Image (cartoon, coloured by chain):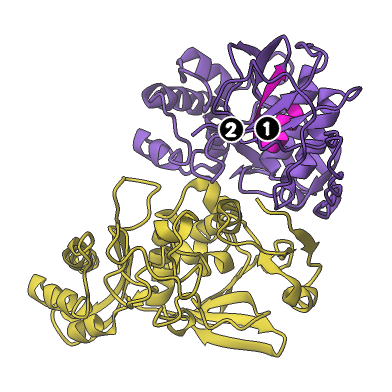
Amino acid sequence: MRRPRVLAFIDPWSPDPAELPAIQAHLRGLGAELGVVTKRGTWLVTPDDPPARLAEAPEADRSFEVADGATLVEALAAAGDAMRTPAPMTFTRREWALTSIAAGFSLALFGCKGKPHEDKPAPAPPPVVKAPMPPEYDIVLSVNGSDRKLKVEARVSLLDALRERLGLTGTKKGCDHGQCGACTVHFGERRIKSCMQLAVMSQGMKITTIEGLAQGDTLHPMQAAFVAHDGFQCGYCTPGQIMSAVAMLAEGHAKTDDEVREMMSGNLCRCGAYPNIIAAIQAARKGAA
Amino acid sequence: MEPFGYIAAADEKMAIDEAPRGTFIAGGTNMVDYMRLGVIKPTTLIDVSRLPLTNIEAAGDGVKIGALVRNSDLAYHPLIQQKYPVLAEALLSGASPQIRNMATTGGNILQRTRCPYFRDMHYAQCNKRQPGSGCAAIGGFNRSHAVLGGSPACIATNPSDMNVAMAALDATVHVHGPSGERDIAFVDFHTLPGDHPEVETVLQPGELITYVTLPAVTGKQHYLKVRDRASFAFALASAAVVLDVQGGTIHGARVALGGVGTKPWRAKEAEAALVGQAPSPAVFAKAADAALAGAKGQPTNAFKIELAKRTLVRALTEVSK
């Protein structure tokens, strides 16, 4: 199923690399993609890809037009507010050269800055309904030896705080439900799943991520062992595997291959690099012994 | 995840005082999962994870376990390894090392079911989530569901391994609430679904689990778990057994089953069939039949009746060697 699509009518407009990040940020917030219809052509912008030129206007769930003098980003922000209100609001559209727009597209236009038609009374402006902002909390996280101050909502996971706020993207998001282990970090001495841990509950404990494991340019022995034994294919699970394996050796409950398999059961590898992962861990264990 | 407020409880009193405003959270492994799925939507979380309830200590002949003791700390503690190996085995058969490092004793007792219809908000029918909406599991995909203790309203299993051992060991749950402290026998702590599967325990609003005590037990202990994978999977059937054999006769028996009951399932009928007998395959089979006598299978989980019997027989055989 495709994501919701919003259509914007604006003229003139052409893709601008400087404007693109802001547009895509709004689209991510809305969980939507955007069709931009101008008199000279149509583009499709998604949250992740550069604008693609389309032959005709695509079907859309909502649409709005951008008033003269307003930018697409401003209009998108206002449209976002309107889309979050429960009831759809219909605006009278202004004159527009519609001949290029494909048949089948609904013209029940929905927008934010439309000019009312001359001989009809202007509709009342839509009430601006904004949900109250969720409370934010000032927290300090001790990550890889330094204290990092953050302001977060209570629902932010430690994983998201590390990745999205502190830029520590070595820790990976796989399932986001505590099952795959890609998000494994050390919380004090313990290995935990950072997706199941709320950031607000993570203060006062030393957190170590994969970025904090090496000493300068010298890899941690477990990292070196994973390289030497080719303990990965795509590499997405690898930071979690390594963090988990380092803590597992410190715990001291696994020696045989079977015990290592059992004690690494919280880290999944969809490539199936398990034999090499076991070999790497056993090499590191014997080197450490 | 829906937004919510957050309060860090400084002490037990503050946690209990704040309880009417929100929901307790400790390890978070179950709560955060279900909040992210949209199954539970607390307005405020009351963080009890920093309360000083993390001790494991001898208490009389038994042991006292703080509600915030992590599953891994409990499983590897010398007192538990020596005196309650069935509990250590049960804990180590559950989840993964990372989850066991986070999950707490109190939280594990309150672990919610893994019923896929309870977890998946796309299903409108779930009496546990939405009382009165119906049960999609009855007549649906119910391979993981209960054969003991179900009702026309719900057949979801209690998924915890730890709880099965706690039931067999006659644990007592100690709680602290607005009207003071009280003790609850573990076997009475969880309730059967009946007409109200949304009610899962006898905990009253605002009550916080503070610690669990285990009495001294005599006999050999074992937890056997049967599941779809060798590791990191919930039980299809499991058995926690304690068998005290003296002079060729079973003097005492404790039997609890997991993966097959709507609550941690203490099988007193099986115990009655064992005590006074000499251990033998025939006696174990009789005990297993007694334990599952009231079982009711669904089209895709009836195999669990036989599976649970064999699991129990094998566990009993193991401890009578």
The label number, if any, that marks residue A243 in the structure image: 2
Which structural element holds mark 2?
Answer: helix
Q: Is residue B317 left or right of residue B264?
A: left
Range of the magenta residues?
A24-37
C-beta proximity under 8 Å, tags 2 and 1: yes
Q: Is residue A51 above or below residue A126?
A: above
Quote the CA–CA distance across marks 2 and 1.
7 Å
Would you say residue B265 is visible in this rendering?
Answer: yes
Any idea which chain is the yellow one in this picture? Answer: B
Q: Which image quarter is the C terminus of chain B in?
A: bottom left
Q: Residue at left 41%, top 63%?
A: B159
The label number, if any, that marks residue A209 in the structure image: 1
The label number, if any, that marks residue B55 in the structure image: none
Going by the numbered disc 1, the residue's amino acid type is Thr
**Which quadrant of the figure has residue B38?**
bottom right
Going by the numbered disc 2, the residue's amino acid type is Met
Q: Nearer the viewer, residue A179 or B232?
A: A179
